């Protein structure tokens, strides 16, 4: 283990929502970090199962904070950030998805990026969970900066790691994955935190782009990798798909309107409208779930255009079959 002398103190935020099995697996992997100066904060986002009892039983020594309601990605992690801000020794705040497994050097290499480049945002590389059985495969979208200064999203799901990262030096990108995102506490104090009104999806990209406009770069650190079970919190919950589509649709439109200009915004809007038609057509063979997805996507388009943000549909209510929309 790396000696804690002179190492920045890192607060690690792990957010749980009805997913204690994945959270416990993630916390077990954190036990093997070779970085010595860190504090784990587990935030339960108002789970309706026995997550709190299960996590406490498995890790009684870890600090577990309970939200009074499901606050979404940013709102849940903000609870841990507020805890970090009370500690004068806290220097870095690392958001780590609960559906991930870290390597012993995952945090060390991320902090090395910070020590090299200073005040900026830092992100690692989520890999497919089965990558260790063969060549590493990337499990993320990367927001690149083109030569003309514009941004483009590149899907790298299942893309060979070595092909995209011939060198492993940190590089500046437009946006980072929210599954492993490190924020210097000083940056959070000066520029605020991720916009909680998104509730779910694209809020970390909005944060990266907002801070980029303020002169704060985002660095991707290829040496810092995690193994990610994509969509972990909604796995085995197909009934959540329509509400997930709602938040994804709304977030795409809000993100385009805020950061990408009129042409990209209109293109995004048209694409979402075509997707609605696609869901309606597929409902002829796939039934009610596809029809409900079309309906919620339509609501996402409406609220994205009108900039209606916040927690408009509660995922926890969707899981309650007695709740109807």
Image (spheres, rainbow, N blue to C red):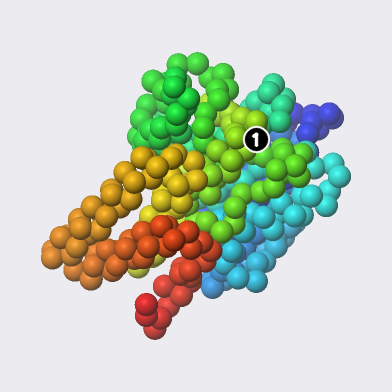
Give the crowd class for mark 1: few <14, some 14-19, many >=20 residues within 10 Å: few
Q: In which quarter of the image is the C terminus?
A: bottom left
Q: Which residue is drawn at 62% across and 63% down?
A: 44
Q: Nearer the viewer, residue 139 or 323?
A: 323
61 over 262 or under it: above or below = below
What residue does disc 1 label? 214
Q: Is residue 251 visible?
A: yes
Q: Where does the image place residue 317, in percent across and percent down from the top left?
A: 46, 75
The local secondary structure at tag 1 comes to: loop
Image side of residue 28 versus residue 305, left or right:
right
Q: Can residue 229 be seen in this view?
A: no
Q: Where does the image place residue 91, in percent across and percent down from the top left?
A: 78, 38
Q: Which of 150 and 153 is in front in this view?
A: 150
Q: Nearer the viewer, residue 254 or 137?
A: 254
Q: Residue at x 62, y 38 (%)?
A: 211
Q: Where does the image place residue 25, in percent across and percent down from the top left?
A: 55, 51
Residue farthest along the bottom direction in this orientation: 322
Q: Quadrant of the N terminus?
A: top right
């Amino acid at each position: 283990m790396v000696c804690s002398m002179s190492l920045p103190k890192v607060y690690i935020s792990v957010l749980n929502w009805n997913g204690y099995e994945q959270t416990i697996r993630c916390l077990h992997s954190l036990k093997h970090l070779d970085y010595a100066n860190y504090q784990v904060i587990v935030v339960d986002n108002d789970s309706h199962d026995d997550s709190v009892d299960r996590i406490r039983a498995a890790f009684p020594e870890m600090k577990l904070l309970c939200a009074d309601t499901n606050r979404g990605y940013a709102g849940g992690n903000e609870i841990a950030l507020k805890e970090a801000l009370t500690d004068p020794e806290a220097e870095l705040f690392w958001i780590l998805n609960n559906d991930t497994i870290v390597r012993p050097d995952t945090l060390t290499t991320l902090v090395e990026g910070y020590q090299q480049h200073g005040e900026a945002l830092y992100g690692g590389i989520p890999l497919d969970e089965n990558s260790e059985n063969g060549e590493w495969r990337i499990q993320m979208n990367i927001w690149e900066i083109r030569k003309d200064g514009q941004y483009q999203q590149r899907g790298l799901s299942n893309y060979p790691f070595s092909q995209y990262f011939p060198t492993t030096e940190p590089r500046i990108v437009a946006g980072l994955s929210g599954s492993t995102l490190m924020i210097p506490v000083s940056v959070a104090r000066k520029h605020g935190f991720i916009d909680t009104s998104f509730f779910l999806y694209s809020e970390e990209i909005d944060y990266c782009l907002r801070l980029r406009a303020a002169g704060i770069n985002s660095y991707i650190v290829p040496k810092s990798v995690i193994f990610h079970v994509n969509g972990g919190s909604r796995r085995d919950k197909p009934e959540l798909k329509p509400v997930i589509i709602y938040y994804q649709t709304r977030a795409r439109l809000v993100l385009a309107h805020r950061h990408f200009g009129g042409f990209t915004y209109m293109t995004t809007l048209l694409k979402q409208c075509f997707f609605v038609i696609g869901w309606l057509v597929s409902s002829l063979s796939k039934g009610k779930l596809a029809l409900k997805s079309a309906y919620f996507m339509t609501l996402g388009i409406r609220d994205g255009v009108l900039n209606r943000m916040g927690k408009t549909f509660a995922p926890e209510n969707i899981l309650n079959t007695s709740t109807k929309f």
